[in-house]
């Protein structure tokens, strides 16, 4: 069996998860739980598709996707950080709103097809058998997804602003007492999360399946949320988790080719069932979760002075 | 400088006023959106929110749509009070429809009057079973119920798709992905002649009364309220968090399952690949808009049902896309959550430190 095409499809299935989980990781590290990933991804997907198909520029589509995700996140940030609204409820509202507005905008784009994002085939080395197409023949967003998670890992563990962001997530009261602008830092983290979710959506509508369909994220935003828990809030494990889930998603496409005779609906259930399974495996160790989860996650911060 | 100052207590007046303000703000947004889409905003709003109520058929359809929203909303609102976030009502609704519908299909040549009660009980138990999974995973393994209940929704919808495309497909149905029609004995009686208004609506009203009794008269309702409002006090009093999680998810799942079976055995009459326009998710808005109170949920269910009917009428009459309904629902919830800040805080102008003491 030729496994290079399989690995290539796994990469395309994993990239949106990696983007979305990277963004949510930073948001949660600052102590904010944004359940609106699915909604931000959908709006990112339609914005990227609409701009790319009207301008003909994939790059403009990518920028539009990130910008749309950021705008969505700013609504969430305003409601939860300035208006002190409940984060769980607001995140759900963001998803419901995102499904509605993306379907509304997308109604005019159903049935359009787009050239998928070009692969940046690097001359000579991308022709190396096996590792050539896998490592050097991807589109720009795949490389960007790895750049982002590496940058986030470096930012959180090696830079002063990164440490401050984590401190805000661990104890907003102490961080505030030390004079750090808790709300401003959280705004930045939430907006970054929105931009990453927007890119995740853009990848879906520009590269994974270059077209627009209502609800095309199909729960990937929620899976990304579960991935952050699975990764116990560590960047390295976010990559691992995203690729594991990408591989599970791809199973259904290849199962029939491998002679597995199961109804497609049961194969489609696999990513969701796997999400439940890993959540159970990780969460049952309460101490581990308590040690790794940002202590202030989901809590409203209201400075008395 | 504008800032928020804690009231120290919940403002009851604002708690009741905030949904009204949110609805008004949503309507104003509607004017802006319709204008931007090049539609006459006055006509669009009339078509959306008034025209459906001008005919008797429109009113009964409103009640048909409100039935699942109220049933599910009652269950969710009780759980939300104890911070049990059951987001998977759509899945519990679907499983309720599958189990109840499966019984109806299995006994398709029966005319026994006991068939309907069995179908309904099957639906309730199916919903409860689907709600029990997140409850078990939460209490036994500490797994987040938001994510597990939502993942199970996707599983339930895929299961329904498999059944109507495969084993339960109508043998005389020209290969359409639909089950056979339920027998008359499995169908809920119609309450209003020449309409689709069925027994489910009466059950929804019963659920409102039941929800009110649980919250205001039963010990567990008291515990739910305390856990939500003062978790430390609840812990001190020794209330079992696990018991409340189980109660919330079984009740929420059971009511969602009942809503699901009522939809297929009352409104639709067979199993289809898609049986819900997102009732399980809209019911989350219903619960919040109704202030997590049974009577409020009833009113909110009617309002959200109007948004569905209005969306359908507006689609036919002035060509608005169906997605406008979801957009309105999201905007309404945003405004509601924004306005809710005034139940806990008051807006102060000027430098901090003055006019404290509340």
Image (cartoon, coloured by chain):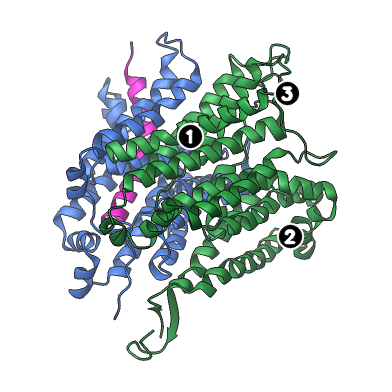
Chain colours: A blue, B green
Is label 3 on the same chain as label 1? yes
Q: Residues within 10 Å of mark 1 (few under 14, many from 20)?
A: many
Q: Is residue A265 above or below residue B343?
A: above
Q: What residue is shown with label 2?
A: B38
Q: Position of residue B61 (x, y in %)?
A: 76, 45
| Residue A96 visible to the viewer | yes
Which element type, helix, strand or loop, lies under badge 1? helix
For disc 1, the chain is B
Q: What residue is shown with label 3?
A: B185
The segment highlighted magenta reads A2-30
For residue B307: magenta?
Answer: no
Task: Name which quarter of the figure residue A213 lies in.
Answer: top right
Q: What residue is shown with label 1?
A: B128
- Pick whichever, B222 or A41, lies toward us: B222
In the image, is B307 to the left or to the right of B85?
A: right
Q: Are marks 1 and 2 in contact (CB under 8 Å)?
A: no
The residue shown at (43%, 72%) is B344
């Amino acid at each position: 069996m030729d496994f290079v095409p399989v690995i290539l499809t796994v990469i395309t299935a994993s990239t949106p998860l990696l983007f979305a989980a990277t963004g949510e990781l930073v948001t949660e590290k600052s102590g904010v739980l944004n359940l609106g990933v699915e909604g931000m991804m959908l709006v990112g997907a339609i914005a990227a598709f609409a701009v790319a198909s009207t301008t003909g520029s994939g790059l403009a589509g990518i920028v539009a996707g990130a910008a749309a995700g950021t705008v969505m996140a700013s609504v969430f940030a305003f409601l939860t950080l300035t208006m002190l609204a409940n984060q769980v409820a607001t995140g759900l509202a963001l998803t419901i709103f995102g499904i509605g507005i993306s379907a509304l905008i997308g109604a005019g784009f159903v049935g359009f097809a787009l050239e998928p994002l070009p692969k940046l085939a690097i001359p000579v080395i991308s022709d190396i058998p096996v590792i050539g197409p896998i490592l050097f023949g991807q589109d720009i967003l795949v490389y960007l997804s790895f750049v982002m998670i590496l940058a986030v890992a470096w930012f959180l563990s090696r830079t002063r602003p990164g440490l401050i962001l984590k401190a805000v997530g661990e104890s907003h009261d102490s961080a505030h007492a030390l004079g750090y602008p808790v709300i401003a830092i959280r705004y930045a983290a939430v907006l970054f999360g929105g931009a990453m979710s927007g890119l995740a959506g853009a990848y879906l509508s520009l590269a994974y399946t270059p077209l627009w369909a209502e609800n095309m994220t199909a729960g990937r935003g929620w899976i990304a949320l579960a991935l952050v828990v699975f990764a116990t809030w560590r960047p390295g494990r976010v990559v691992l988790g995203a690729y594991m889930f990408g591989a599970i998603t791809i199973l259904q496409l290849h199962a029939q080719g491998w002679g597995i005779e199961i109804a497609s609906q049961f194969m489609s259930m696999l990513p969701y069932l796997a999400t439940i399974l890993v959540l159970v495996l990780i969460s049952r160790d309460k101490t581990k979760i308590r040690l790794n989860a940002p202590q202030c996650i989901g809590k409203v911060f209201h400075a008395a002075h | 400088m504008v800032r928020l100052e804690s009231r120290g207590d919940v403002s009851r007046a604002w708690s009741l006023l905030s949904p009204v303000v949110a609805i008004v703000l949503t309507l104003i947004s509607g004017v802006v959106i319709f204008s931007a889409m090049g539609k006459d905003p006055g006509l669009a709003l009339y078509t959306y929110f008034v025209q459906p109520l001008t005919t008797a058929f429109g009113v009964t359809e409103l009640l048909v749509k409100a039935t699942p929203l109220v049933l599910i909303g009652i269950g969710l609102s009780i759980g939300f009070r104890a911070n049990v976030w059951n987001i998977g009502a759509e899945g519990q609704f679907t499983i309720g429809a599958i189990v109840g519908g499966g019984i109806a299909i299995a006994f398709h040549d029966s005319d026994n009057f006991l068939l309907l009660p069995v179908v309904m009980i099957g639906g309730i138990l199916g919903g409860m079973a689907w709600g029990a999974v997140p409850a078990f995973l939460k209490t036994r393994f500490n797994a987040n119920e938001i994510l597990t209940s939502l993942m199970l929704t996707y599983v339930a919808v895929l299961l329904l798709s498999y059944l109507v495309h495969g084993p339960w497909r109508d043998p005389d149905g020209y290969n359409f992905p639909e089950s056979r029609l339920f027998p008359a004995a499995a169908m809920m009686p119609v309450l209003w002649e020449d309409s689709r208004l069925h027994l489910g609506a009466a059950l929804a009203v019963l659920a409102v009364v039941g929800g009110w009794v649980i919250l205001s008269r039963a010990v567990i309702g008291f515990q739910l309220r305390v856990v939500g409002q003062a978790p430390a006090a609840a812990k001190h009093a020794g209330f079992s968090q696990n018991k409340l999680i189980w109660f919330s998810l079984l009740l929420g799942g059971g009511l969602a399952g009942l809503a699901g079976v009522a939809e297929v055995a009352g409104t639709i009459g067979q199993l289809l690949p898609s049986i819900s326009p997102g009732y399980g998710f809209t019911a989350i808005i219903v619960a919040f808009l109704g202030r997590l109170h049974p009577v409020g949920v009833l009113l909110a269910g009617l309002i959200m049902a109007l948004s569905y009917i209005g969306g359908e009428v507006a689609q036919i009459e002035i060509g608005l896309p169906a997605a406008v309904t979801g957009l309105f629902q999201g905007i309404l919830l945003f405004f509601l959550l924004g306005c809710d800040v005034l139940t806990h805080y008051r807006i102060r102008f000027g430098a901090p430190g003055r006019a404290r003491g509340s």
